[in-house]
Image (spheres, coloured by chain):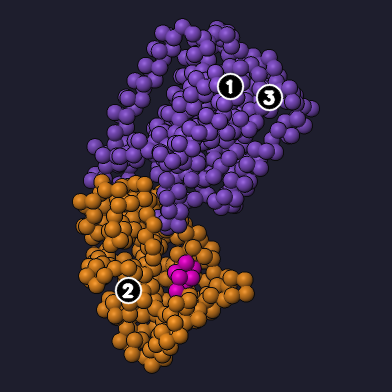
Chain colours: A orange, B purple
Amino acid sequence: MTQMSLENVTMQFGSFRALTDMSFHIDRGEILGVAGPNGAGKSTLMNVCTGGLRASSGQVSFNGRDVTRFKRHARCGLGIAQTFQIPTLLSSLTVGENLLAGQIFGTEVRGEATGISMDEILFLTQLEDSLQMDAAQADLLTRKRIMLGAALATGPEIIFMDEPLGGLNAEEIVEFLQVIRHVREELGITIVMVEHKTRALAEIADRVLIINFGEFVMLDTPQVVLNDEHVVEIYLGKKHDA
Amino acid sequence: MSSSKTKTENSHITSVFTGAGLRQHSLVYWAVIAALALAGGLIGDSYIHHIFILVFIWCVVIASWDLILGYAGIFNYAQLVFFTFGAYGSAMLSIYAGVTPLLAILAAAGIGAVIGVVVAVPSLRLKGEYVALFTFAVHLALPPLIQQGKAIGMGGNTGLLGIPWLNLFGYQVSSIDKLTWYWVSLAIGAICVYLIYFVILRGRMGLAFIAMRDADTFALAIGVNEYRYKMLAFVASAVFTAVAGGVYAHYTGVVTPRVLGTEFFLMAMVMLAIGGMGRFPGAVLGVFIVVIGNELLRSFDDYRLLLLGVAVVLTVIFLPLGVAGLFRKRG
């Protein structure tokens, strides 16, 4: 069942076109991976979905509602959350206060309780023991947990994650993938993740979207996508260029 | 423990934003205020009273500035503009409209709110240092405006003289009655500073301010309505500062465009630099240190400003977070 859809979305910055005529659907409860070489427009795509950018043309819909012109905090109120590549947190506050902020402002912008209890969030993120710690002292994996926890505290139906595995070592990747999987399984939240680590994507994603030069390339199961000749060429070609 | 307003369970999270420690901290705060009130009665020297009256008025200005600059991270340099509008507004209401000073000071709060909105609307379209440029331009543009305002009774360069004395329920408080003024300014100052640091900044607004300051994009992503909270920061800051301006006008009996002069502005900056921003009670202590220090240095005459400058440099080097840095550890 379609939860979010983009129809002919184009994002223009002056004369530069970062996204061209992008159309696809995101199904409720799926884990959708987004991949593509550097500069393909992945971050722009995320921002168009979460409200960081307003599409120059085309339409972004969420639960059948046109949200193209909604700002970031208003989209948060509809149930669209996100985590960032670099986890910049409320660094002068404690870990617990970071989560609390998500809950308080999520509730405010929604106009009702968020529907995800703090207990569930603490269970998933395993932050229970570090609630009183200063967020600034947390290591990278913990910061990612905090950011995810705060996003969950707003009571989302979908979470956009920008390179959630970036900077983590192999062990941490396994650990964090498990957390992400639990978020989908326990809470039924849809996950869209931009990720360079294609092996991890293949492991966790239901479908993978490939974009290149701001254009849609393909969207299918990981097996199909990652064995596609054209996709392999995009990736390897880019690698040699770099 | 923590009283949660939201329906969902968050009993594990103890935080100042859910009321943790509020009672104890308030108790300490009011005990200090009571001690100051008592000390006022024991001090026999009216000059010392005068210095403390200035300290109490400055405390409100600096606490308000700390709210917007230190907590909300908005580079607002129009703080003395709010002060000036409060002072002139309150003075003019009582001179020309015969409003009793206490009510005029209350009205100054309303004037402050309006000016806060007026300065905020363009500022909110700007980011970072551009807010500083714009707000400081407003500060610089005000003295000529006041001169033009001579036509509507703003007194031009000489300012407004003969501002009516405070009338406390039939009792006229002259500027010479320092002891009463000591208590009045302490009471008003204490209430304002309490509202700023214990009510606003420990509530949802304070949390939103800190969130926007620490990580603006993240704050938006978790639902903070940036426009609304930044607007509130301007309004709250302007309201209290304007009240301070009103008190100042009725205490000194005179307001001139000199309140927008460089010395006042620099003093305010020095108080924040020495006290430290965004961490109560740093900024407020900065006021005590600078105003009292400035008086103690008076005998050095011309070297006074130089010594203040040295004090700022030393503070920045050895206490980069100001006096507030000494209160850094939070258990």
Image location (x, y in percent) of residue B191: 45, 25
Q: Nearer the viewer, residue B142 or B283?
A: B283
Q: Chain of mark 1?
A: B
Image location (x, y in percent) of residue A62: 44, 67
Dot 3: element = loop
Residue at label 1? Answer: B301
Query: Label 3: how many residues lie within 10 Å, few (<14), some (14-19) or many (20+)?
Result: many
Image location (x, y in percent) of residue B161: 70, 17
Per the picture, the main secondary structure of the magenta-coloured stretch is helix
Q: Residue furthest right?
A: B151
Dot 2: element = strand
The answer as to whether the residues below labels 1 and 2 share one chain is no
Q: Amino acid at mark 3?
A: Thr
Which region shows up in magenta? A42-48
Measure how far apart labels 1 and 2 are at the Cα level: 72 Å
Measure how far apart labels 3 and 2 are at the Cα level: 66 Å
Q: Chain of mark 3?
A: B
Q: Residue at x 33, y 90 (%)?
A: A227
Measure how far apart labels 3 and 1 are at the Cα level: 24 Å
The answer as to whether the residues below labels 3 and 1 share one chain is yes
Vertically, is A74 above or below B123? below
Q: Amino acid at mark 1?
A: Asp
- Say if mark 3 contacts mark 2, CB within 8 Å: no
